[in-house]
Image: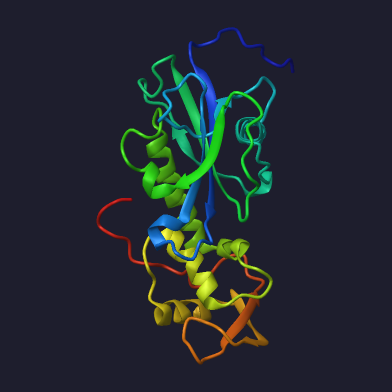
Amino acid sequence: MATPARDRQHDFFVYVDTVVLTVSREKSLEPKERLQVLVMHRPEAPKDKWALPGGLVADNEDLPDTALRIVKRETGLTVPKADLIQVGTYGKPNRDSRWRAISVAYVVLVPEPETPAPESNSDDARFMPYRTLRDDGILEFDHRTIIRDARRTARQQLEDTPIALKFCKHEFTLTELRWVYEALVLDEVDPANFRRKVEKANDFVRASDSLITFGSEPGRPARLYTAGKTKYLNPPIRFRRKLRPH
């Protein structure tokens, strides 16, 4: 059977936008300030306007490959293809004033990322707090909506899978693990309740024989843990969502 040829081209463009998230380890930060998003600045954009790394899908290029190529080009970072999670598709007619543009968005969580160093199509790139970027007027296009949806996707992964362990060392305390959860939840998490949820999840973490002599409670050594083998948390670790959307 012959492969059908394309006989028409509609007047629109297909883009990929990528939300690269990380969790800051700066001890002075409140939970709502820990989640950081990688953004870039287009040379032709106003100086106070930022955007997600994004660009046109090349001919014969798979969408995840576009995501990797554009993130590298516009921020200098290399992200793992296997960790990309599709967030959704965005195609409102007025989302881009230049032309009709449809975008497929991905999110990827990156612990300890490299320092951004744009290669082309960008004159600056940096990590900025998620809560800052959720304010009106900072992000171009509909990227404010995309990062909101990306955080929700990442939070769902956090509740259903052991993805938080990507941000922990081989041995870690529950306080260090809770730090990651608080960043995605954007709020403090009760330590005792968190411990119960973590220990109830089947083979999520395993207690180590090691103890460290410093922790969140002065005078009490903290237990160290290592990652378990599960790929899905059973039961999931859920946290009550606030009424106001973030």
User: 24 or 4, which is in the foreground?
Assistant: 24
Q: Which residue is situated farthest in the right direction here?
A: 1
Visual colour scheme: rainbow
At a point 49% along the width and 66% down the height, the residue shown is: 27
Q: Position of residue 82 (x, y in %)?
A: 67, 48
Q: Position of residue 161 (x, y in %)?
A: 55, 63
Relative to 63, say whether 220 is above or below: below
| Residue 240 shown left or right of residue 175 in the figure | left
Q: Quadrant of residue 163?
A: bottom right
Determine if residue 203 is in view. Answer: no
User: 14 or 166, which is in the foreground?
Assistant: 166
Q: Which residue is situated farthest in the top direction here?
A: 7
Q: Position of residue 201 (x, y in %)?
A: 53, 76
At a point 33% along the width and 50% down the height, the residue shown is: 246
Q: Position of residue 35 (x, y in %)?
A: 46, 54
| Residue 169 shown left or right of residue 219 in the figure | right
Determine if residue 169 is in view. Answer: yes
Q: How many marks?
A: 0
At a point 62% along the width and 55% down the height, the residue shown is: 112
Say which quadrant the N terminus sits in. Answer: top right
Q: Which residue is situated farthest in the bottom direction here?
A: 219
